[in-house]
Amino acid sequence: MNLYSYADHNPIRFVDPQGTFPVAGLALSGGIIVEWGIHYYLMNRAYGLFPDDPEGRKKHCYVNCMSTRIHLGNPVMATGFSVVQEVPTLVRGAVNGQFRREIRDSAGDLAADYFGQFVAYAIWRSCKEICDQCPGF
């Protein structure tokens, strides 16, 4: 039995020309689930660290700071989750006639997200300590 038939008998290329081997799909799905879990945990932790943050900017800063550090300085996942998180808010604002207010709020959230990603490189300070001084945008 040839174990590399799905890759056209070439394990170095490791491609699946007919799309019959679901490794890539399974890996992508698993990665998304793990990422969602990490961000969900960080979000819950941020709610405990910053209970007096009515606009949520410090929470956004903290989650993105920690996510960037977890991913060894690569803010791609944090950015992706930040943008995707704002989409339902904007849709809700468009439906209920509050789009201008929601877009301002989303812009402030994204500014706090990017602030958190930027300051994540200051590894000599904790994300909580840094995000305590996150501007209110």
Image (tube, rainbow, N blue to C red):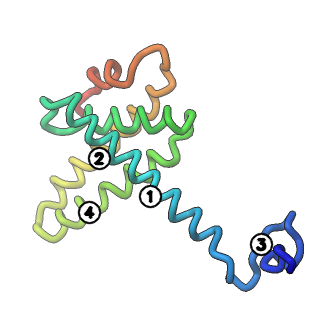
For mark 1, give the secondary structure.
helix
Residue assigned mark 2: 107
Q: Earlier in the sequence, mark 4 or mark 1?
A: 1
10 Å neighbourhood of mark 4: few (<14), some, or many (≥20)? Answer: few
Label 1 is placed on what type of residue? Ile
* 21 on left or right of 92: right
Identify the residue at horizontal 78%, vertical 79% (top origin).
Answer: 6
Disc 2/disc 1 C-alpha distance (Å): 26 Å
- Image spot of residue 2 (x, y percent): 86, 78
Residue assigned mark 1: 33
* 110 on left or right of 103: right
Residue assigned mark 3: 15
10 Å neighbourhood of mark 2: few (<14), some, or many (≥20)? Answer: some
- Assign the N terminus to one quadrant of the image: bottom right
The dot on residue 88 is 4
Label 2 is placed on what type of residue? Ala
